[in-house]
Amino acid sequence: MECKVNGEKVRLELVSCRDLNFGEESPGVPAVDYELFIPIEEFAAALRGFYEDFAEDDRVYGTDDEAELILKLRSLKWPALADLAQGFPEVFCQLVLEYMAYDALQTIFSGREPATQKRYVINSVRAVALEGKTVVFRGAALDVEAPRVAN
């Protein structure tokens, strides 16, 4: 896995995901663009349980809104996450963006050692893409070490 901030590669030890108030602005804390690159095998392994629970809940209980995406996944019979990415990349990316992004980030970053002070705190996911065999998250991160800005 690797991360870029404003187009420059940064050490993963400097990156974390915001737990509380994810997606909300933090007045005075500058936001930067990030890209997080996760090999599909690592992503699928980390999110397998979450995805299987999501699929099982839909099979057992259905959903209130019957979103077009969920209907598409039903018609595909909820394939394994890696298979979905390979065979139906647009469906995979939409699923991750709309239903799994925050949980994916929390899962991916939860097992990391908090050995160093974090500089970049991921605060949003604006887009999810597949580039070859890599899942790419793009969004905004807070640069918690940058000088504060007036609002």
Image (spheres, rainbow, N blue to C red):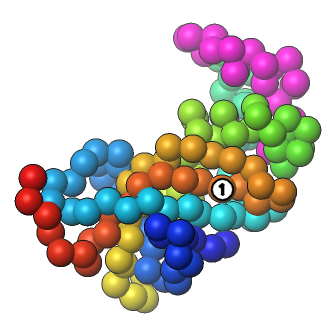
Quadrant housing residue 83: top right
- x 76%, y 64%: residue: 39
Segment tinted magenta in the rendering: 63-81
Residue type for callout 1: Val
Residue most extreme to the left: 150
The residue positioned farthest toward the front in the image shown = 7
Name the residue that disc number 1 marks.
136
Q: Is residue 84 left or right of residue 27?
A: right
Q: In front here: 55 or 117?
A: 117
Q: Nearer the viewer, residue 28 or 81?
A: 28
105 shown above or below 66: below
Q: Residue furthest top?
A: 65
At x 53%, y 69%, the residue is 7
Asked whether 16 falls inside the magenta stretch, the response is no
In the picture, measured across the screen, residue 76 lies left or right of residue 4, that is right
Instruction: Measuring from the top left, give residue 24's x and y in whole percent.
Output: 28, 45
In the rendered image, residue 134, in percent from the top left (x then y), is placed at 76, 59
